[in-house]
Image (tube, rainbow, N blue to C red):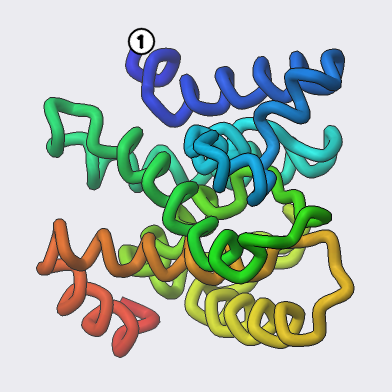
Amino acid sequence: MYLLLNHTTLIIIITVIISLAAWQNKTLFNRLIFYPPAVSRGQWDRFVTHGFIHADSMHLLFNMFTLYFFGRVIEGLYRPFVFGYGFVLFYVFAIVVAMIPSYIKNKDNASYLSLGASGGVSAVLFAFILIAPWESIYLFAIVPIPAIVFAIAYVAYSIYANKRGGSNINHLAHLWGGAFGVVATIVLRPQILPHFFGALLNPFG
C-alpha cells in the first residue's frame, strides 16, 4: 500500500497529468511556464507551477525516472518532518529556490522562459549523494558511475554550460537545486555530514 501511496509516486502522477494537460492546452501551458515579466506582475505561483510541466515526453520521462529511483530514499529521510509532508515541502521549495537566481538574472528579459522539474529532481539527487556517495548512478540508465563522481562532473559541466550559454537547458536551476538539496538536508539532518565523510573515506565499506 505504501508503495502505491508514497509522496514520490503522487508527485510523479500529478506532474505527468499536468504536463499532459498542458501539452493539449496552449493557454494552460503558457499560464504555468516560468515567465519573468508575468512573475513581476504578481504571478508568483509560476515559481511552483513551472516545475510541473515539461517541454516534451523525453524531458518528462528523464525527470520522473530520476525522481522515482532516488525520491523514495530521500522521502524516508524527510517524512518525519511537517506532519509527514516534509518531502513534499522539500521538493516544492527546491523547485522555487532553484529558479530564484534565473529570475534575478532574467527579471526584465521578455524572451526568457523556463519549465521542468529539474530543480527539484537535482535537490533529490544531491541529497541522495550525501547518503550514499559511492552508490552507482546509471547514466542514460546504462553506464554505472559512482554518485560522488557523477556529482563532481555534473556540477563542473553545469557551471561550464551555464557560462557558455546558447542552450535551452536551465543549468543554473540544476546547480541551485542541487545546492538546496545538500544544504537543506544538512540543516535538517546534521548527522548526515559525518555519515557522508565516513562513507566517502570508506568506499568499500
> Quadrant location of residue 119?
bottom right
Instruction: Pick out the residue farthest to the front.
Output: 41
Amino acid type, residue under disc 1 in the picture:
Met
Q: Position of residue 107 (x, y in %)?
A: 62, 61
Q: Position of residue 56 (x, y in %)?
A: 85, 36
Say how many tags the image has. 1
Looking at the image, is 102 positioned above or below residue 53?
below
In the displayed structure image, the side of residue 90 where residue 136 appears, left or right: right
> Quadrant location of residue 38?
top right
Looking at the image, is 68 positioned above or below residue 104?
above
Front in this rendered view, residue 143 or 38: 38
Q: Is residue 63 visible?
A: no
Q: Position of residue 80 (x, y in %)?
A: 13, 36
In the displayed structure image, the side of residue 141 where residue 10 appears, left or right: left
Front in this rendered view, residue 61 or 159: 159
Q: Position of residue 158 (x, y in %)?
A: 67, 77
Q: Residue at x 57, y 32 (%)?
A: 49
Q: Which residue is mark 1?
A: 1
Secondary structure beneath dot 1 equals loop
Q: Residue at x 27, y 76 (%)?
A: 196
> Quadrant location of residue 181?
bottom left
Q: Looking at the rendering, in which quadrant would you find the N terminus?
A: top left
Front in this rendered view, residue 120 or 3: 120
Looking at the image, is 44 positioned above or below residue 189?
above
Looking at the image, is 56 positioned above or below residue 129?
above
Q: Residue at x 31, y 64 (%)?
A: 131
